[in-house]
Image (tube, rainbow, N blue to C red):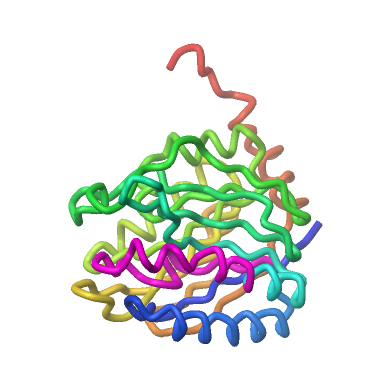
């Protein structure tokens, strides 16, 4: 089975849900017209990390998800991107919603919070990993800082993920970490990675974009560069299985030794 995956890279407007939704609404139409079947959006794409109003903005997420469900059904898309979700204790979750042809099939709450920027004070960490059963196959989801924890991606691969999607807001000057870690997760797990980073100045941060789609050999199939825009690339489950048969890393594992 071959599918077309896409990423929508843009500058998230802090606290401006209406502007961000307007941008994404139009971009989803564009990538659908170009044949995309699965689309990844940035981390916290609807609101940004607008800490002062985060709890209030989180109350609107259900309505945004409902609109995404309508857009997903209209364009026949799997859509993945994270937004704030009320946690019930004054904090919020950073939650990725996985929407498949109009249905909310799974959600993933970011496990690893970036304490360097104080995420652990405003956000509540999730519990558990997420492998979504979609119409296109098994899709794992991690969010931004989760990328630095290879155990999570390996668990998703062992559970059958064909693709790992990574919504992010990854800032300068750590571009090479981003690129290297994305390729490493693809290579070591012999699967596809579709990562969508925001771009441009957002609050005090300067984000570099570089959204990428990477194949199981670590080859970069598409790179968005630093400006707003959309990328897409074909994914082949048959080619992935052939590569795994050629170098059978999973068969050669010795987990009892580590």
Residue drawn at 62 percent across, 80 percent down: 28
At which x and y percent is residue 100? 71, 60
Q: Quadrant of the C terminus?
A: top left
Is residue 220 visible in the rendered structure shown here?
no
In the displayed image of the protein, which residue is found farthest to the top? 256
Residue drawn at 50 percent across, 12 percent down: 256
At which x and y percent is residue 17? 43, 78
Q: Which residues are magenta?
A: 38-67
Residue drawn at 47 percent across, 54 percent down: 95
- The image quarter containing residue 226 is bottom left
At which x and y percent is residue 74? 76, 77
Q: Is residue 98 above or below residue 45?
A: above
In the displayed image of the protein, which residue is found farthest to the right? 1
Q: Quadrant of the N terminus?
A: bottom right
Is residue 241 visible in the rendered structure shown here?
yes
Which residue is more in the foreground, 55 or 107? 55
Residue drawn at 30 percent across, 61 percent down: 176
From the viewer's perspective, tell me whether residue 3 is left or right of residue 158: right
Q: How many numbered markers are drawn?
A: 0
From the viewer's perspective, tell me whether residue 26 is left or right of residue 173: right
Can residue 191 be found in the magenta stretch?
A: no
Which residue is more in the foreground, 155 or 242? 155
From the viewer's perspective, tell me whether residue 131 is left or right of residue 226: right
Which residue is more in the foreground, 187 or 226? 226
- The image quarter containing residue 71 is bottom right
At which x and y percent is residue 16? 38, 81
Can residue 56 be found in the magenta stretch?
A: yes
């Amino acid at each position: 089975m071959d599918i077309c995956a896409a990423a929508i890279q843009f500058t998230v407007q802090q606290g401006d849900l209406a502007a961000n939704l307007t941008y994404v609404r139009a971009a989803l139409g564009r990538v659908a017209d170009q044949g995309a079947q699965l689309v990844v959006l940035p981390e916290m794409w609807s609101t940004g990390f607008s800490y002062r109003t985060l709890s209030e903005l989180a109350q609107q997420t259900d309505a945004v998800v409902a609109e995404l469900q309508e857009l997903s059904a209209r364009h026949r898309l799997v859509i993945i991107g994270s937004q704030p979700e009320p946690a019930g204790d004054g904090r919020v979750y950073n939650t990725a919603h996985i929407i498949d042809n109009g249905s909310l099939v799974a959600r993933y709450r970011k496990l690893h919070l970036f304490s360097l920027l104080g995420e652990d004070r405003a956000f509540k960490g999730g519990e558990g990993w997420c492998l979504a059963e979609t119409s296109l196959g098994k899709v794992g989801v991690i969010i931004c800082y989760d990328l630095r924890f290879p155990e999570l991606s390996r668990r998703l691969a062992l559970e059958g993920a064909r693709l790992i999607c990574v919504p992010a807001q990854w800032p300068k000057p750590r571009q090479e970490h981003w690129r290297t870690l994305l390729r490493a997760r693809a290579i070591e797990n012999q699967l596809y990675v579709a990562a969508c980073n925001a771009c441009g100045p957002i609050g005090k941060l300067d984000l570099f974009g570089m959204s990428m789609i990477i194949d199981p050999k670590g080859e970069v199939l598409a790179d968005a560069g630093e400006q707003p825009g959309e990328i897409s690339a074909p994914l082949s489950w048959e080619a992935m299985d052939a590569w795994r048969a050629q170098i059978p890393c999973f068969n050669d594992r010795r987990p009892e030794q580590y």
